Amino acid sequence: MGSMSIWHWLIVLAIVALVFGTKKLGSIGRDLGSAVHGFKKAMSEGEAEEKSRQLKHEGQDAEFPESSKMGDPARDRKV
């Protein structure tokens, strides 16, 4: 009795179709589909932008000041 059979689902679907109408359900489905499509497109564009940003930064060397307060550890080591 805990699970719903196919007949229960068909009755629920029929009631929902009667309450909202098939045109309204179609437009809701279309809107939901376009929202999912837009979300997937934004995610793929964001990933592509992140990859291009990472590639751009990998090609650049880090810039350090010429004279730093800390000396070279190999040079400062006393033997």
Image: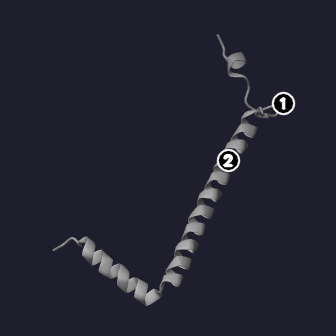
Q: Position of residue 26 (x, y in %)?
A: 53, 77
Q: Is residue 56 above or below residue 73?
A: below
| Residue occupying the far left of the picture | 1
21 and 57: which is toward the camera = 21
Residue at left 23%, top 71%? 5
Q: Distance between the Cα atoms at labels 1 and 2? A: 36 Å
Which tag, 1 or 2, sits closer to the chain's start? 2
Q: Amino acid at mark 2?
A: Ala
Residue at left 26%, top 77%? 8
Residue at left 72%, top 44%? 53
Q: Amino acid at mark 1?
A: Glu
Q: Quadrant of residue 78?
A: top right
36 and 30: which is toward the camera = 30
Q: Is residue 55 above or below residue 47?
A: above
60 and 35: which is toward the camera = 35
- Numbered label attached to residue 4: none
- Numbered label attached to residue 66: 1
Quadrant in which the N terminus appears: bottom left
Q: Quadrant of residue 69?
A: top right
Local secondary structure at mark 2: helix
Q: How many marks?
A: 2
Local secondary structure at mark 1: loop
Residue where numbered disc 2 is placed: 48
Q: Is residue 60 above or below residue 72?
A: below
Q: Position of residue 46 (x, y in %)?
A: 66, 53
Answer with left or right where residue 26 lies relative to residue 70. Answer: left
